[in-house]
Structure formats: structure tokens, C-alpha cells
Image (cartoon, grey):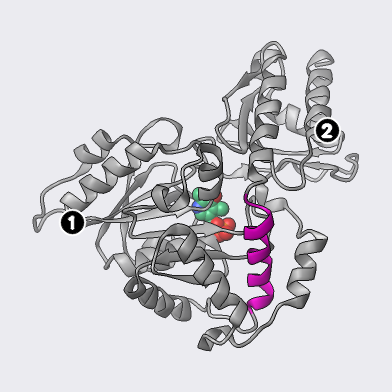
Amino acid sequence: MLYTPPPRDPDAPPVRINLLSDTQTRPTPAMREAMARAEVGDEQIGDDPTVNLLCERVADLLGKEAAVFMPSGTMCNVAATLVHCRPGDEILAHESAHIIAREGGAHAALGGFQITPLPGADGQFSPETFRKALHPRSRYQPPQVLVSVEQTANIGGGTIWKKGTLDEIVALAKANGIATHMDGARLLNATVATGIPAPAMAAGWDSAWIDFSKGLGAPIGGVLAGSREFIDAAWQWKQRLGGSMRQAGICAAACIHALDHHVRRLADDHANARALARGLSQIAGIEVQEPETNLVFFKPDGAGISGDRMVTALRRRGVLLAMMDGRIRACTHLDITAAMIEETIGYVREIVRTA
Ligand SMILES: *Cc1c(COP(=O)(O)O)cnc(C)c1O
């Protein structure tokens, strides 16, 4: 389920249109200026004013008491499960979840947790599926202590969990003494797309985090939020994992800049994704999943060309994207313009015509 970029191709020109991932954004000149101006201190002892400001802003943004700055989204997930669970505990998550498929087995290796993969379309499981997976506490079965969702669901195609579904899952979890974790790597894509404010979307989730190195365009960082007590415990794991930093305000300044300038514009990424999907769907034989946010999954096989060949042919035209899970994934972001989308659609049409 990992994406596999096309192999290095000596005939390929430099990449001009990078649709590989929203992690490919480069810090803008204004972001770099904000970084250069940042007031800094020793983050590890709580003395970096820019990091502290970022944490306050994200806690506020998500409607939580406190927050901690982490070097990556993965560390947000890992620290969170390490706080919520003990060895032998069971976590419930969708079968395509990042915590299962993309974190190198961290939750098993470091925590000794087992994750039960729940099925469901588009990266989401239903409250009913969750309810059916619950079992009574007994000495035989692992204690079920945490349920995790991804908002938006990455492999699911950037789909948005409905607020009503999230609320039902929270209610079921609480009724069964299960803690709740929201992997909000792209949570702000969901809030911008739906207009539902982040505190409402994250309400009832004991821990939630956002990633700054995806569509928000910062070079590194994720911020994990929750209760004061939860964040104190997450800080201990951050220290143990080697995630405590020093003059990290340089990076936090990029994240604050992103909060000020790169959130509302996520709507442009969604519009570009819709335009790409519309253009591709008008080419006979191309099968496209209607995007809800910034990820477009499509299959060209029906047009007489395999996904791998399409990816290679696009790369020869300076467009970078990749296969993921048997389909091609195109991801729109800060460095992708509407003109680039039109250009890409034109190339796909030309490749199909000459295939
Ligand atoms: C990218 C991503 C992560 C991990 O974030 P990194 O900053 O790359 O470590 C976790 N969950 C989801 C859904 C993601 O898309």
C-alpha cells in the first residue's frame, strides 16, 4: 500500500509538476523568512517561545487543554498509543490505517500492542462494524483500550469521516471504557472542505493531532493535543523516543506561518483535485474516484494502458506521481496550480491517444 514512485529514468526531464504527495511542498519564501526571524530557546526544557506559542495555538484550534510539538506525525501517533495503552492491549483501527501499514510496526515494537484491522469502504469503518468488534473483558481476550480514526482517511482516498459517524464511535467507545485517538494528519482538509470547525470535529477524541508537513507546507512537524495530563505523559515519551529538540522554534515558526496563511487555501487544493478528477473522467476508459479533499485516485487500465506505464509516460513529461494500492494517486498541494492540472490532464489525454 506504499506508493512506489517510478524508477529513476535517465530520459526523464526534471520534475515540473509534482503530484506525488502533499509532503513534497517546499517552504515558501515567506515561510523561510518567518523561520529566519523566529525567536528561539531550548525546546527540551520548555523554553522556546515560538514552540510554546505554536502548542497554545494548536490546543486552541483543536479545542484541547494542551499540546506538544513533535518532529513528525508518526511520533504523534506513537507517543499517543504509548500513553493510552499497555503491552498486550488492543487498538481498533481501519485496516488501511497509517498506524498499521506505515509506521514500521512501531506500535508492536515499542508498545507491544496489537491492532485489530476493521474493514470498511474508503478507509472508514462503520459504528456497527466497531460495535461488532467489541468483546467483553475477560482473561482470554486482549483488553480493548483504544480506537483510532484517520481524518481524512489517507488510503481511503482522502475521504472525510462524517461528524455524525465520529460522534457515534465516540459514544460507543465511551460506553465501553475505550479511549479515542484521531490521526488528524489532514484534519484541516476535512474542516476546510466541510466548514465544520476543528473543535467540533475533534470533540470527544481524547487525543488528536495535525501534521504540518503535508498540505500545510511546513518542512517538518506535527502537534499532538489532548488533556493537560495526557500531554504531560506524551512529553515523557517524546523524551524517551529522542523527540525532544533544542532551538525548534525555527521549525515551529514555519508551522505558525502555515496556520496563518495556508489553512484557508486548502480549498484551492480541493478545487484543483476536483478539476483533475473531472478532466480525467472525461477521458474514455479512465476510472476516477470522486475526491472529497486533495487526493485523487484513478485507474487508466480501461483506456488500454496500465497504471505503471501511465506513471512512466507522465514522468517523461515532467509530471511525478505514483501507484498506490493498484491505482495511481495524484495529490494536490501548495505547489500545484490550476494551470498545472490542465497541463496534466492534457498529457494523460495524449498518452491514452498514443497508447
Ligand atoms: C503522513 C501521515 C502520517 C505520518 O506523518 P509523518 O509526518 O509523515 O510522520 C500519519 N497518518 C496519516 C494519515 C498520514 O497521512
Note whether residue 313 is visible. Answer: no
CA separation in Å, label 1 and label 2: 51 Å
Is 168 situated above or below 89?
above
Q: Amino acid at mark 1?
A: Gly
Quadrant of the image occupied by residue 276: top right
Taking the spot 57% from the left edge, 25% from the top edge, the residue there is 290
Number of marks in picture: 2
Dot 1, crowdedness within 10 Å: few (<14), some or many (≥20)? few
Note whether residue 18 is visible. Answer: yes
Taking the spot 53% from the left edge, 80% from the top edge, the residue there is 244
Magenta span includes 137: no
The C terminus - image quarter? top right
Dividing the image into four quarters, tell me where ligand 1 lies: bottom right
Q: Earlier in the sequence, mark 1 or mark 2?
A: 1
The magenta span reads: 248-263
Closer-to-camera residue (142/232)? 232
Left or right, residue 138 beside residue 91:
left
Left or right, residue 332 beside residue 52:
right
Q: Amino acid at mark 2?
A: Ala
Quadrant of the image occupied by residue 271: top right
Residue 98 image position (x, y, % from top left): 47, 50
Residue 161 image position (x, y, % from top left): 42, 38
Is 323 situated above or below 180?
above
Is 94 situated above or below 56?
above
**Which of the two discs, 1 and 2, sits closer to the camera?**
2
Disc sitting over residue 339 in the figure: 2
In the rendered image, which residue does mark 1 sit on?
177
| Secondary structure of the residue carrying numbered label 1 | loop
